[in-house]
Image: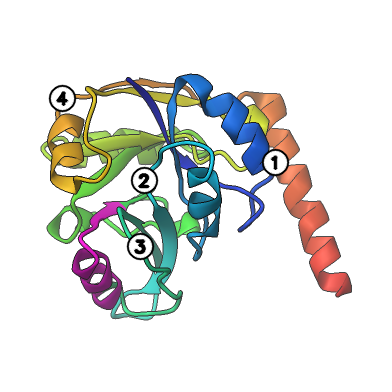
Amino acid sequence: MKMEFHIHTPYSDGLNPIRYLNWYGRNRFLIITDHNTIRGSLEYKKYRPTIIAEEILCKRDDGRNVELIGLFINEEIPKGLHYMEVIDIIRAQGGLVVAPHPLDDARYGFGEDADRYVDIIEVFNAKIDNPIYNNRAQEIFKDSVKIVGSDAHYPLALNSTEIEIDEFDIDNPKDFLNKLKNAKFRVKYYSWPTRMLWRGWRIVRKILKNKK
């Protein structure tokens, strides 16, 4: 089956309407990972099967902000907690922990020791500006369970990555983890127009936010 991981909706800072994702997801399995909320996942699940997920902003011991993704969770996890508390909450819910864009400090990467704490490492993120972060992640975490993510906040960014994975039980995290070990990945970076569009939207969003 085809799967796409790391997608954002208007429930956080994305521009992918749920109804559009319903159409787009007619021939692939989508995993919504909105920032600090599971509402996007829950809404999408009304239309198609999915794994409930959330990308959570948390803190390391030195106060640095980092992000972790919880898969197979059923309750929303608040932002701002210590990373170990977030990991404990995810696992208490029976979920799996993912480190997205782990080496990109500008985007709250967890760091080179991510594999000590998480179940899955995102070794390719299509949104990353500097390919060195993805290249290093693939080298450093070569022995970890890996995943790739589109990090798609708007429709043009979708289909940047594709995961070919054997059918798995969507209610069984262990089955998903085992099948992911043998998955095949297709990846590409955002095109120049796609990247410029996203940067433009970020500027507009900041202006609108400052006017409030």
Instruction: State the residue lying farthest toward the right.
Output: 211
Image side of residue 18 versus residue 64, left or right:
right
Q: Is residue 93 above or below residue 17?
A: below
What separation in Å lies between label 4 and label 2 (alpha carbons)? 19 Å
Q: Say what amino acid the circle numbered 3 marks.
A: Asn
Magenta stretch bounds:
84-98
What separation in Å lies between label 3 and label 4 (alpha carbons)? 26 Å
Residue placed under numbered mark 1 in the picture: 198
Marks 3/4 in contact by CB < 8 Å: the verdict is no
What separation in Å lies between label 2 and label 1 (alpha carbons)? 26 Å
Closer to the chain start, of discs 3 and 4, is: 3
Marks 3/1 in contact by CB < 8 Å: the verdict is no
Closer to the chain start, of discs 2 and 3, is: 2
Marks 1/4 in contact by CB < 8 Å: the verdict is no
* Position in image of residue 151 (x %, y %): 50, 41
| Residue name at image x 48 percent, y 45 percent | 45
Q: Label 3 crowding class (10 Å Cα cut-off): few <14, some 14-19, many 20+?
A: some
* Position in image of residue 177 (x %, y %): 17, 40
Q: Label 2 crowding class (10 Å Cα cut-off): few <14, some 14-19, many 20+?
A: many
Q: Label 1 crowding class (10 Å Cα cut-off): few <14, some 14-19, many 20+?
A: some
Mark toward the viewer: 1 or 4? 4
**Residue 145 visible (yes or no):** no
Instruction: State the residue lying farthest toward the front.
Output: 46
What separation in Å lies between label 3 and label 1 (alpha carbons)? 30 Å
Residue 51 disc label: 2
Closer to the chain start, of discs 4 and 2, is: 2
Mark toward the viewer: 3 or 4? 3
Q: Is residue 207 magenta?
A: no
